[in-house]
């Protein structure tokens, strides 16, 4: 079994990539939740509670919020 790397063992580029990825993921989640809260239920495909749960609980690296913006909202 390979040894786990510690934060201090990572290169500056990898650390930066992890931080930027986390910031992008967090921003997408906040934007999706704000949109979900402001949008009437009639304009949402599915349950608002289910979408909010999925957006906040699933560790998706930004995938769930993007799916919400693309498929979860009615036009």
Image (spheres, helix red, strand yellow):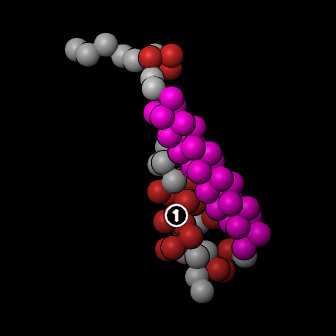
Q: Nearer the viewer, residue 60 or 24?
A: 24
Task: Kindly tell me whether residue 50 is visible in this rendering.
Answer: no
User: Residue 39's spot in the image, x, y percent?
Assistant: 72, 73
Q: Nearer the viewer, residue 29 or 17?
A: 17
Q: Quadrant of the N terminus?
A: top left
**In the rendered image, which quarter is residue 72 located in?**
bottom right
Query: Range of the magenta residues?
Result: 12-39
Residue at 51 percent of width and 53 percent of height = 62
Q: Quadrant of residue 30?
A: bottom right
Residue 15 appears in view: yes
x%, y% of residue 45? 55, 75
Secondary structure character of the magenta stretch overall: helix
Q: Quadrant of residue 29?
A: bottom right
Q: Position of residue 17 (x, y in %)?
A: 50, 40
Q: How many labels sit on residues?
A: 1
User: Does the segment drawn in magenta span residue 26?
Assistant: yes
Within 10 Å of disc 1 (Cα), the crowding (few <14, some 14-19, many 20+) is some
Residue 54 percent location from the top left of the image = 54, 53
State the quadrant of the C terminus.
bottom right
- Residue lying at 68% horizontally and 66% vertically, measured from the top left: 36
Give the labeled residue for mark 1. 66
Q: Residue at position x 52%, y 64% from top?
A: 66
Magenta span contains residue 60: no
């Amino acid at each position: 079994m390979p040894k786990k790397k510690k934060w201090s063992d990572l290169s500056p580029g990898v650390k930066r990539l992890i931080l930027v990825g986390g910031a992008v993921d967090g921003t997408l989640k906040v934007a999706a939740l704000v949109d979900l809260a402001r949008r009437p239920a009639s304009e949402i495909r599915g349950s608002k509670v289910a979408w909010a749960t999925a957006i906040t609980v699933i560790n998706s690296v930004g995938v769930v919020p993007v799916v919400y913006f693309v498929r979860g909202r009615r036009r």
